[in-house]
């Protein structure tokens, strides 16, 4: 047994240190980034925020709403090929360039991904997603998908350490998805005791990926726009959001009336709810590693995404970054033991 003594940090452990800046207004800040991806050589330009591939987040409606801001949606893997055919024919090229096609790692998943990708050349991203990205099987699957789709942008995960980031990039991933345990409806840390504080995971994995020309997605754990900014400041190229984009008209969750108020159901993808819906219940050998919650219904996602982008722009002005790309270079985190003042409740 070994113990690593370095303290690892989450978003709540730091704040940005403000820096002198010549920027006069947050409207001067450019959130759009241009990436050319390592293996595929493909380019993408947009605001590098991604709606998570969860049932009640990564819907087709979410993709259509967020693509207006050039924000990506990782569409969840429970739509059929027919659903995709319909989506592809009713969406413009810009929407299609801003979606990720999510897949697991089974033979059936591979076939389905082939069928979906064949629907339109505009589809650019494939998101290979399993809870435990440390499985050797994921590496082999990434190699297989890379040889089948040499010119598509492939994301693979989830992992939290540099060694595995490197292995996945060597196997053919352009982007590695980072996060085990930080999610808002995730119970992995409670059920298994496994995890890694998300800000440290991002800092360490970004360093490994960038050294090889790869990119990372910081996935999970953002509770507010400030956390999204901290993820970018720590080196995340993309930030994936579940809970922050759940509970909206476009999220597609079930609406529930309670005491005259409207709520929307939101659940983890390995929760009892998800497994009841998609796999006929929780298999005997495993425990559910996600929970189900009711969120106050928040209406269209437009205000929320504007709010998030506004917050990140404002961070950039506080540290003097004219572009999101410069945020990491301008970031000094200070370790803290306090965050917001909650004397009048929480925002
Ligand atoms: P959030 O933004 O809500 O904090 O985190 C979203 C992320 O949580 C997702 O992108 C995914 O990586 C993770 N996640 C979603 N469902 C589950 C689940 O049931 N169990 C676990 N361990 N993680 C989940």
Image (cartoon, rainbow, N blue to C red):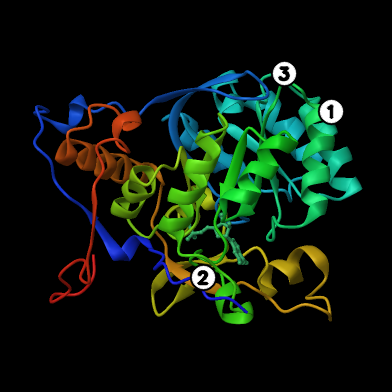
Point out the frontmost of discs 2 and 3.
Answer: 3
Note whether 61 is above or below 1 in the view shown.
above
Query: Which quadrant of the figure contains the N terminus?
Result: bottom right
Q: Is residue 162 left or right of residue 235?
A: right
Looking at the picture, how far across and down is residue 169, in whole percent? 66, 37
Of mark 1 and mark 3, the one earlier in the sequence is: 3
Q: Residues within 10 Å of mark 2 (few under 14, many from 20)?
A: some
The answer to whether any part of residue 291 appears in the image is no
* Residue at screen point 54% across, 57% down: 179
Of mark 2 and mark 3, the one earlier in the sequence is: 3
Measured in 3D between alpha carbons, the distance from the residue under mark 2 to the one under mark 3, in whole angstroms, is 39 Å
Provide the residue designation for mark 2: 256
Note whether 151 is above or below 218 in the view shown.
above
Element class at badge 3 = loop
Provide the residue designation for mark 3: 121
Q: Is residue 78 left or right of residue 64?
A: right
Note whether 324 is above or below 202 in the view shown.
above
Point out the frontmost of discs 2 and 1.
Answer: 1
The answer to whether any part of residue 103 appears in the image is yes
Looking at the picture, how far across and down is residue 312, in whole percent? 28, 42
Measured in 3D between alpha carbons, the distance from the residue under mark 2 to the one under mark 1, in whole angstroms, is 43 Å
Looking at the picture, how far across and down is residue 345, in whole percent? 19, 74
* Residue at screen point 15% across, 70% down: 341
Point out the frontmost of discs 1 and 3.
Answer: 1
Provide the residue designation for mark 1: 148
Marks 2 and 3 in Cβ contact (< 8 Å)? no
Measured in 3D between alpha carbons, the distance from the residue under mark 1 to the one under mark 3, in whole angstroms, is 14 Å
- Quadrant of residue 9 within the rendered picture: bottom left
Looking at the picture, how far across and down is residue 165, in whole percent? 61, 46
Figure quadrant, ligand 1: bottom right
Q: Is residue 281 left or right of residue 157?
A: right
Element class at badge 1 = helix
């Amino acid at each position: 047994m070994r113990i690593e003594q370095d303290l690892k940090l989450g978003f709540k452990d730091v704040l940005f240190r403000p820096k002198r800046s010549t920027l006069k207004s947050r409207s001067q800040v450019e959130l759009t980034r241009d990436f050319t991806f390592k293996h595929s050589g493909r380019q993408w330009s947009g605001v590098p925020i991604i709606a998570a591939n969860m049932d009640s987040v990564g819907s087709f409606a979410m993709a259509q709403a967020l693509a207006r801001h050039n924000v990506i949606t990782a569409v969840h893997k429970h739509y059929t090929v027919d659903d995709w055919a319909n989506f592809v024919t009713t969406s413009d090229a810009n929407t299609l360039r801003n979606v990720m096609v999510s897949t697991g790692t089974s033979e059936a998943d591979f076939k389905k991904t082939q069928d979906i990708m064949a629907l339109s050349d505009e589809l650019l991203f494939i998101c290979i997603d399993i809870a435990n990205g440390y499985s050797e099987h994921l590496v082999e699957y990434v190699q297989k998908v890379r040889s089948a789709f040499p010119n598509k942008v492939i994301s693979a995960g989830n992992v939290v350490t540099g060694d595995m980031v490197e292995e996945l990039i060597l196997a053919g991933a352009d982007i590695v998805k980072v996060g085990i345990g930080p999610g808002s409806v995730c119970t992995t840390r409670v059920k298994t005791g496994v995890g890694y504080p998300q800000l440290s995971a991002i800092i360490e994995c970004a360093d490994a990926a960038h050294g090889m020309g790869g990119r990372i997605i910081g996935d999970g754990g953002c509770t507010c726009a400030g956390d999204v900014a901290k993820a970018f400041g720590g080196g995340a190229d993309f930030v994936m959001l579940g809970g922050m984009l759940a509970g909206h008209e476009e999220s597609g969750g079930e609406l529930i009336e309670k005491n005259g108020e409207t709520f929307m159901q939101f659940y983890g993808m390995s929760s009892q709810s998800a497994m009841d819906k998609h796999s006929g219940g929780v298999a005997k050998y495993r425990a559910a590693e996600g929970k189900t919650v009711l969120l106050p219904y928040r209406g269209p996602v437009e205000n929320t995404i504007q709010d998030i982008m506004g917050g990140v722009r404002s961070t950039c002005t506080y540290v003097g970054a004219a572009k999101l790309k410069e945020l990491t270079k301008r970031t000094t985190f200070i370790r803290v033991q306090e965050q917001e003042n909650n004397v009048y409740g929480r925002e």
